[in-house]
Amino acid sequence: MSKNLVIVESPAKAKTIEKYLGKEYKILSSYGHVRDLPKGNLSIDIQKDFTPSYEVPNDKKKIITDLLKAAKAADTVWLASDEDREGESIAWHLSEVLNLDKTKTKRIAFNEITKTAILNAIENPRKLNDDLIAAQQARRILDRLVGYEISPVLWKKIRPNLSAGRVQSVATRLIVDRENEIKQFESSSAFRVLSLFGLPSDDKTLDAELNKRFADAKETQTFLEACKTAKFTVSDIETKPSKRTPAAPFTTSTLQQEASRKLGFSVAKTMLVAQQLYEAGFITYMRTDSTSLSGLAISTAKTAIEKNYGEKYHKMRQFATKTKGAQEAHEAIRPTYIDNQNIDGDAAQQRLYDLIWKRTIASQMSDAEFERTTVNIDVSSRDEKFQAKGEVLVFDGFLKVYMETKDDGEEDSEVKGLLPPMNVNDVLSVQNISARQAFTQAPPRYTEASLVRKMEELGIGRPSTYAPTISTIQKREYVVKEDREGNERTYKTFELDGKGNITEADKTETFGAEKAKMFPTDIGNLVTGFLVENFNTIVDFNFTANVENEFDEIANGELRWTEMLRKFYNPFHKDIEKTIKTTERVTGERLVGIDPKSKKNIYVRIGRFGPMAQIGESSDEEKPTFASLKKGQSIETITLEEVLELYKLPRVAGQFEGEDLVVAIGRFGPYVRLAKTFYSLPKTEDPLEISEERLIEVIKEKREKDAKAIIRVFEENPDVRVLNGRFGPYVAVEKKNFKIPKSIAPESLTLQDCLDLSEGKKLAADTDTTPVKKAAAKKPAAKKATAKKTAKK
């Protein structure tokens, strides 16, 4: 047996490390966390200084057994989980669960998976950092307290199966608040005036814009009338140098933002691919809020820049991290070997690596140099001036490699064009002056990227929490990320041609179209409003940021974690008790109108299974009738006409196989029922409009898909089936699934074999009867699947 056992979190990381250590080292993976607070109960003894009761989940028990065996046989156990607080926590849980002897246990951490970094870590081991462990434990316990105490209140006061969280609820509030800003926004308009002038020397033209916008059409017409006989003279030409500086190397936040803007990656995908790159040894650790680069990285970048672009393109820089609470000891995200511009990997890995490489290299390059020119043009009959701006790129510097993109509402960084040559006192001829009514824009809705940036600005969460938070609020259906069509509006234009003719026109445009933006759902609005009213401290931005700072203080040994929790919990628990006693049930009910048939009131509200309409009163002798709202409809905006359309469901949309095709909306969305079988309709289909032909297609497609998944069925017991699933063949007995041993052909299983597997009995050549979901967690499968399992929450 090997004298040294090295334990890491993921098999991909283990595989990379194996390349750098000799035969005396055995590398095993814990597959992420090995112990946690169990689901289903609080598992925290509040009276005993918030003592947690951890347990090893079932899918980790075999892993622990294997690690125990290897640890007993080793002379030294090296805990090599990631270098952040969560990694420190994993190492501590391993030491506790495996009951490791402190005298033969060493903690090592490294920012990059390279031979130099790993050997250096082994030469400089340390003890487990109790302060980092305490900070992570405080975070875990505080989040459990918030979630487990507020969620039952939401179940009682709004509807079952809701949840609240210290960070997720604040993130949702940001989106709800922004939506409310947009609803309250009142657009105003002004006329923007643009001109196209002819130059006296040649046939070149000059585009310019008036330095004032007019409030209404009358002012605009008056100005254009004055321009008919006006003389346009170049009064001033100002030319001055300017420069643009490269952005800092990537932090977790800026990588998520730029990968979203440039590559179209979701925040979760960015972190998954970045983890794959890290574990393969291609980049440094991907959870960091530091923009610092090591001396070696700066030196290597210098060599690469001078080799590829020349000495004048290099400028050494060390960026100061602006994020509050940032851990300066860490590095920014960079390639482990900067001289490697390309890597082997799938398309997503190559694209993200290319982005990281370019950003890192650009950060160490010279400024881009420009010459900006501004030309002012007098209008003889008016005080306003036209202005033309141009920009010449004198030296491209870092722009040779990389240009940062911007979010909605920000100025872009495109280089403007070169102005044609002209002189002061040149008289210009009018080819065209146009005025267009322009409207002020509401604040932009958040994308995943801009939400991350806002959370970072407010100090909400830390690098490891951005992606899981954004995934959680979408999974909980408090927020949806989607595209939405815009609306049409009319705008007015005026145009003065070179002959002095003014024309007026009304035109239409589409505005407000959204792509991959985040919208609050009805339930997201309702829950946020309830939390703001009853637990304002929890969803207060300053409180959430202050809690993060207190975690930092615990990590630095400046604050006891139990004191921090006690200070928080006592007033929080009083709010819980008060809210349960004093608040009424909340449904967001709104009276929409009166049903023309029954003359009863029609309401929309949040029901047990989501937004719904109701005709009649709950107190009436005749029970009210209900209808579920369609996807995209909101209780805040739905009209009476739209509600009445919902009551056309369920509807018979045709026939198939001698049975009616009944279309309706249920708990899980729209569906078609054929006899006693239900088939979900695609989200793109409108249940009120879908045709008989399309319904038959949906049914046939589902049947074909189901048929491919069935390996064997048993007429004598229909509850037992042999199926083909995502992780391979398995046996389904009623609602439980059981893995089929690799040594046994699924087609050969008898009914008795299946029942034996469900009871934990071994078949011939059987060595594993683990339920299918658990088996999947143990299986070091393909690269992508592995990365998903090892990604941190």
Image (cartoon, rainbow, N blue to C red):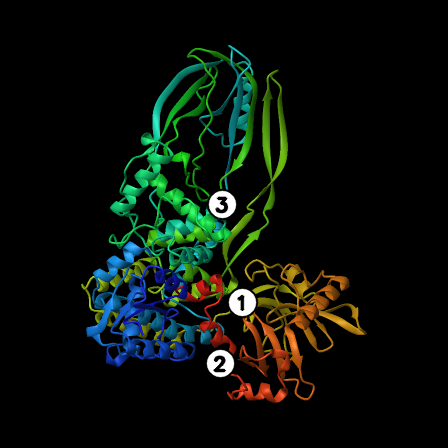
Q: Amino acid at mark 3?
A: Glu
**SS at badge 1:** loop
User: Is 255 situated above or below 705?
Assistant: above
Q: CA distance from mark 1 to mark 2?
A: 48 Å
| Tag 1 residue | 589
| Tag 2 residue | 770
Circle nearer the N terminus (1, 3)? 3
**Rendered image quadrant of residue 360:** top left
Q: CA distance from mark 1 to mark 3?
A: 26 Å
User: Is 411 situated above or below 600?
Assistant: above
10 Å crowding of disc 1: few (<14), some (14-19), many (20+): some
Circle nearer the N terminus (1, 2)? 1
Q: Amino acid at mark 2?
A: Thr
Q: Residue at left 28%, top 47%? A: 293
As rendered, which of 237 and 730 lies closer to the eye? 730
**SS at badge 3:** loop
Query: Between tags 2 and 3, which lies in front?
Result: 2
Residue 556 relative to residue 475: left or right: left
As rendered, which of 506 and 519 lies closer to the eye? 519
Q: Which numbered disc covers residue 186?
A: 3
Circle nearer the N terminus (2, 3)? 3
**SS at badge 2:** loop
User: Do the CB atoms of the residues marked 1 and 2 lie less than 8 Å apart?
Assistant: no
Q: From this viewpoint, is residue 446 visible?
A: no
Q: Position of residue 764 (x, y in %)?
A: 55, 86
